[in-house]
């Protein structure tokens, strides 16, 4: 039994490319040829477009992946930098606190005093008068603890020279050089000198005595 040879159009449809399709199709089937050619061309164009779209999509995915990787690395580097900054800050704060503590310990040296009570002579008029009063002087101490730069703040009774003679014999060590101090002397009628108070930054010493200098 003889088999019929497939029509040229069918042969053309079995082709895998356009050039083969043109060779196989009869030139007499003009209309059908044009239709099949356009269909074939459309199919090839569709395949080309799909391939290009696929490449673009893959390229976009690749670019997006790179950006995500870059963002991840940036975030990781930022996190590492933050950890390093926090650690450095903690070390600096610890060092500062230790330095501050050492400085405070140095500032809080033991204060030693050699202070005599000033039995200042009071004129008879003030002894007999029914009065209460106090004297006040300011002075500094040098690095050796000696009282220097004695100045009157309030005194219209005893006199600056007598007070200086007593204060300059004092010694107050452990205070910073040129530390400012004040001393007050309190007099009470019928008792005499009853209180002597030396005070300054971080230091105060009060001596209470009865019936002295009356």
Image: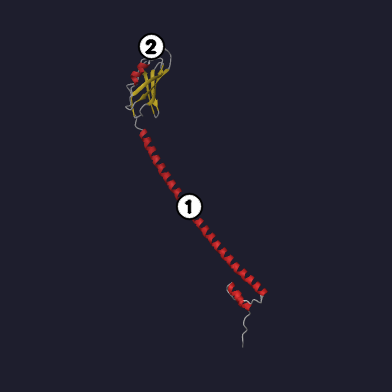
Mark 1 surroundings within 10 Å by alpha-carbon count, few (fewer than 14), some (14 through 19), many (20 or more): few
Q: Which mark is residue 124?
A: 2
Q: Position of residue 24 (x, y in %)?
A: 60, 77
Whole-percent x and y of residue 130? 43, 14
Rendered position, 139 above or below 94: above
- Point 45% across, 49% down: residue: 81
Residue 155 image point, x, y percent: 41, 17
Percent across and percent down for residue 116 are 33, 22
Residue furthest to the top: 125
Nearest the viewer among 210 and 9 is 9
Instruction: Provide the secondary structure element on which disc 1 rests.
Output: helix
39 with respect to 98 (left or right): right
**Can I make out residue 37 in this image?**
yes
Asked whether residue 120 appears in the rendered view, the answer is no
Question: Residue lying farthest front?
Answer: 27
Q: Earlier in the sequence, mark 1 or mark 2?
A: 1
Label 2 secondary element: helix
Is 167 on the left or on the right of 46, as rendered?
left
78 or 195: which is nearer to us?
A: 78
- Is 74 placed above or below 137 here? below
- Viewer-nearest residue: 65 or 127: 65
User: What residue is shown with label 1?
Assistant: 74
Q: Which one is nearer the viewer's eye here, 190 or 2?
A: 2
Horizontal placement of 37 versus 187: left or right? right
């Amino acid at each position: 039994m003889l088999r019929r040879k497939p029509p040229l159009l069918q042969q053309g449809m079995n082709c895998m490319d356009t050039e083969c399709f043109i060779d196989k199709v009869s030139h007499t089937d003009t209309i059908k040829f044009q239709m099949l050619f356009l269909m074939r061309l459309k199919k090839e164009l569709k395949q080309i477009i799909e391939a290009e779209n696929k490449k673009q999509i893959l390229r976009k995915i690749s670019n997006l992946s790179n950006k995500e990787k870059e963002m991840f690395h940036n975030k990781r580097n930022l996190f590492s930098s933050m950890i390093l900054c926090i650690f450095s800050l903690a070390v600096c704060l610890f060092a500062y606190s230790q330095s501050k503590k050492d400085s405070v310990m140095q500032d809080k040296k033991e204060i030693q005093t050699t202070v005599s009570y000033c039995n200042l002579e009071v004129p008879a008029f003030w002894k007999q008068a029914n009065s209460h009063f106090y004297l006040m002087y300011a002075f500094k101490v040098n690095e050796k603890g000696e009282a220097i730069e004695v100045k009157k703040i309030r005194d219209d009774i005893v006199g600056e020279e007598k007070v200086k003679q007593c204060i300059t014999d004092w010694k107050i060590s452990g205070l910073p050089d040129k530390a400012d101090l004040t001393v007050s002397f309190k007099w009470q009628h019928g008792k005499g000198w009853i209180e002597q108070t030396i005070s300054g930054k971080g230091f105060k010493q009060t001596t209470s005595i009865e019936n002295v200098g009356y």
